[in-house]
Amino acid sequence: MVLGNFKKIMCKMSLVNNAATKYSRKLSTSDLMSIAWDREFSFNNQLIFEGTGVLDKAEWLAAVETASAAYPGSRLIMKGYPFASRWVDSGITPRVREVDGSKWTGYSNE
């Protein structure tokens, strides 16, 4: 029990003392449910933009960088132990992937 408490304290200290971490929050009940069900039924949404014409990837990258700086919630990673974890700002801009979705129906995860 003492070792378990020591790990919890060290985890909390590392989160508090990490100067790069600007945003942090506890996992909510819906976060825990999402994590538990993700392998069976993934209902976590990603952003998908469809269109025709030219979508300039450089402009998308710049827009995502600007948006993630304004909304650190888009850069969260989980730190800590199960049921004592927190979402913390990684400081890393989310990636932009360009894929050929011309054959995607919108009803599958492929």
Image: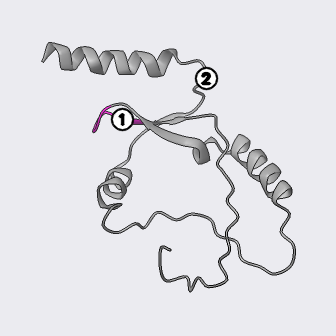
At horizontal 58% and vertical 45% (from top left) the residue drawn is 73
Q: Name the residue under label 2.
A: 20
Residue 82: in magenta span: yes
Answer with left or right where residue 99 lies relative to residue 41.
right
Give me the residue at 47% from left, 73% from top: 109
Estimate the x, y position of residue 94 in percent, counting from the top left: 64, 48
Residue drawn 83% across the image and 68% down it = 55
| Within-10-Å neighbours for mark 1: few <14, some 14–19, many 20+ | some
Residue at 57% across / 35% down in the picture?
89
Position of the N terminus by quadrant: top left
| Label 1, label 2: how far apart the Cα atoms are | 18 Å
Query: Which residue carries the number 1 mark?
Result: 85
Q: What stretch is highlighted in magenta?
A: 81-86
CB under 8 Å between callouts 1 and 2? no
- In this view, 87 is above or below 46: above
Residue 36 horizontal/vertical position (percent): 29, 55
- Type of the residue with mark 1: Ser
Is the residue marked by circle 2 packed among few (<14), some (14-19), or many (20+) residues within 10 Å?
few
